[in-house]
Image (spheres, rainbow, N blue to C red):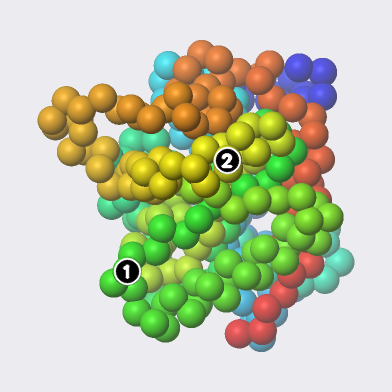
């Protein structure tokens, strides 16, 4: 793949220790990281020097999972977002002002049957225990194919408190503004059947998920969602019903043929470097710059 360096192909290699790779890659470029092991899962935390933070503004915790299923290269799920955030971390190291960003590369997103089994749930629970519930949490997943940013519909529980709903809606609105600035208004809100933001929502911490799709796929999916409410319900409830489907031998993704082609590549050999698109990396660079510049008073 001409627009990506050979190191990215090394990151995709089946024998790559991805947590080690991320840390060594960052270290070689002057970015310090720490290994955070929670419930046996290896997360990588990137925090910057004290001059990068201003306590009068919200911390932006930005997340991408680095694990993948064994049978897939995982180029889009989720190596592309990892790579984009790794390069962003190098850029942030020399940012001339405070940015209030910390980055987690999480482990275990692909292993969870339910939200509480996912790797990010351990981080979210730790945040909750330490009283860190005022962060803005942004999750980037599958950001290497397509040019249209998709902000995932919330999936908030109807039992959520009015205060939490207000906090989440505020973050959601600000995220829409970030995308609007970054893309000249070319973004969409759609149901997304995956990502680590569910772990934070379950712990009472506002979190949003962003992915990318090709324009044609996003438009077709939106039309299907608008014409078939049951499809949206199936997508939004996929993770919570996964264990039940496995135990009762119900076919997984019975609605898969209605999902965007990009998502149907997940967990297959076709989620490879050739499936990625240069435009995605340009769009993500713009989004991450817009996110850097977004600063919200506490």
Q: Mark 2 = which residue?
A: 223
- Identity of the residue furthest to the top in this view: 269
- Looking at this view, is 254 or 46 the one in front? 254
Residue beneath the point at 70% across and 51% down: 187
Comparing 239 with 47, the one in front is: 239
- State the image coordinates of residue 43 (x, y, percent, origin top left): 46, 47
Task: Give the SS element for disc 1.
Answer: loop
Around disc 1, counting alpha carbons within 10 Å, would you say few (fewer than 14), some (14 to 19), or many (20 or more)? few
The residue beneath circle 1 is 158
Above or below for 10 versus 89: above
**Relative vertical location of residue 254 with respect to residue 280 in this rendering, above or below:** above
Is residue 100 visible in the rendered image? The answer is: yes
- Which residue occupies 16% across, 25% down? 249
Residue at x 41% of width, y 58% of height: 155
Identify the residue at the far left of this view.
248
Q: Tag 1 or tag 2, which sits nearer the N-term?
A: 1
Name the quarter where the N terminus is drawn: top right
- The x, y position of residue 24, in whole percent, is 63, 36
Q: Is residue 50 visible?
A: no
Where does the image place residue 229, in percent across and percent down from the top left?
Answer: 41, 47
Q: Secondary structure at mark 2?
A: helix
Q: Tag count in the figure? A: 2
């Amino acid at each position: 793949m001409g627009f990506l360096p050979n190191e990215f192909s090394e990151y995709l290699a089946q024998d790559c220790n991805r947590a080690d790779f991320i840390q060594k890659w960052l270290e070689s470029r002057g970015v310090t990281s720490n290994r955070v092991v929670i419930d046996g899962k290896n997360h990588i935390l990137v925090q910057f020097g004290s001059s990068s933070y201003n306590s009068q503004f919200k911390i932006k915790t930005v997340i991408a999972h680095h694990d993948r299923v064994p049978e897939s290269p995982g180029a889009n799920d989720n190596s592309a977002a990892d790579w984009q955030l790794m390069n962003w971390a190098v850029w942030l190291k020399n940012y001339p002002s405070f940015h209030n960003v910390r980055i987690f590369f999480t482990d275990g997103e692909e292993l969870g049957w339910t939200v509480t089994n996912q790797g990010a749930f351990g981080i979210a629970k730790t945040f909750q225990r330490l009283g860190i519930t005022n962060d803005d949490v942004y999750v980037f997943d599958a950001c290497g194919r397509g040019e249209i940013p998709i902000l995932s519909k919330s999936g908030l529980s109807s039992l959520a408190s009015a205060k939490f709903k207000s906090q989440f809606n505020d973050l959601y609105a600000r995220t829409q503004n970030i995308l609007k600035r970054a893309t000249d208004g070319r973004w969409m809100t759609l149901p997304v059947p995956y990502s680590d933001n569910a772990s934070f929502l379950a712990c009472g911490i506002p979190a949003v998920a962003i992915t990318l799709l090709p324009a044609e796929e996003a438009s077709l999916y939106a039309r299907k969602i608008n014409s078939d409410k049951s499809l949206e319900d199936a997508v939004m409830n996929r993770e919570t019903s996964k264990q039940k489907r496995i135990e009762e031998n119900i076919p997984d993704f019975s609605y898969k043929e209605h999902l965007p082609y990009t998502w149907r590549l997940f967990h297959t050999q076709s989620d490879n470097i050739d499936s990625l698109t240069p435009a995605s990396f340009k769009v993500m660079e713009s989004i991450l710059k817009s996110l850097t510049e977004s600063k919200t008073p506490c």
